[in-house]
Amino acid sequence: MKTHKKYIERNDLNKATHLEVNVSYNKGGANCFSGGTRPRGYYLSVTPVTKSSTSISFVAFTGQSQFLLETKRFSAKQFAQAIEMSKAYEEELIAAVVAKNKAA
């Protein structure tokens, strides 16, 4: 599935070197961790990662996501719309993830 990713280098994170900012489509459905369901559509997620020349690693449950747009199926037009919508939430989500994963 198509995703829109970018990496932001940060020096103030605990056990991470970058933030991965990702807009992607999710088919939705049952969520094993929360016990509820996720709507089908596009999401913005920000996750702290450690990026080297050969690999990218992350720690589970350290990132956050924001639901952007509910859809019935994937389409390029709606994906472009979700990328535009993500700009309104990106800074807020980055600030929340940095505050949660700040180096001591």
Image: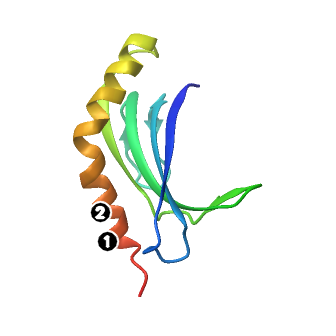
Which label was assigned to residue 76? none
> Badge 2: how crowded within 10 Å, few (<14), some, or many (20+)?
some
Residue 66 occupies quadrant: top left
Mark 2–mark 1 Cα distance, whole angstroms, equals 5 Å
Q: Are marks 2 and 1 in contact (CB under 8 Å)?
A: yes
The quarter of the rendered structure image containing the N terminus is: top right
Residue type for callout 2 = Ala
Q: How is the image coloured?
A: rainbow
Residue 67 occupies quadrant: top left
- Read off the residue under disc 1: 99
Q: Is residue 14 visible?
A: yes
Toward the viewer: 18 or 63? 18
> At which x and y percent is residue 41?
39, 27
Residue type for callout 1 = Ala
Mark 2 element type: helix
> At which x and y percent is residue 52?
69, 61
Kindly identify the residue that appears in the image at 41 percent across and 21 percent down: 79
Kindly identify the residue that appears in the image at 24 percent across and 54 percent down: 92
> At which x and y percent is residue 18?
52, 60
The quarter of the rendered structure image containing the C terminus is: bottom left
Mark 1 element type: helix
> At which x and y percent is residue 44?
38, 41
> Badge 1: how crowded within 10 Å, few (<14), some, or many (20+)?
few
Position above or below: 92 against 72: below
Position above or below: 88 against 103: above
Kindly identify the residue that appears in the image at 77 percent across and 55 percent down: 54
Residue that sits furthest to the bottom in the current view:
104
Kindly identify the residue that appears in the image at 28 percent across and 37 percent down: 87
- Read off the residue under disc 2: 96
Q: Is residue 71 visible?
A: no
Position of 68 with respect to 75 (left or right) is left
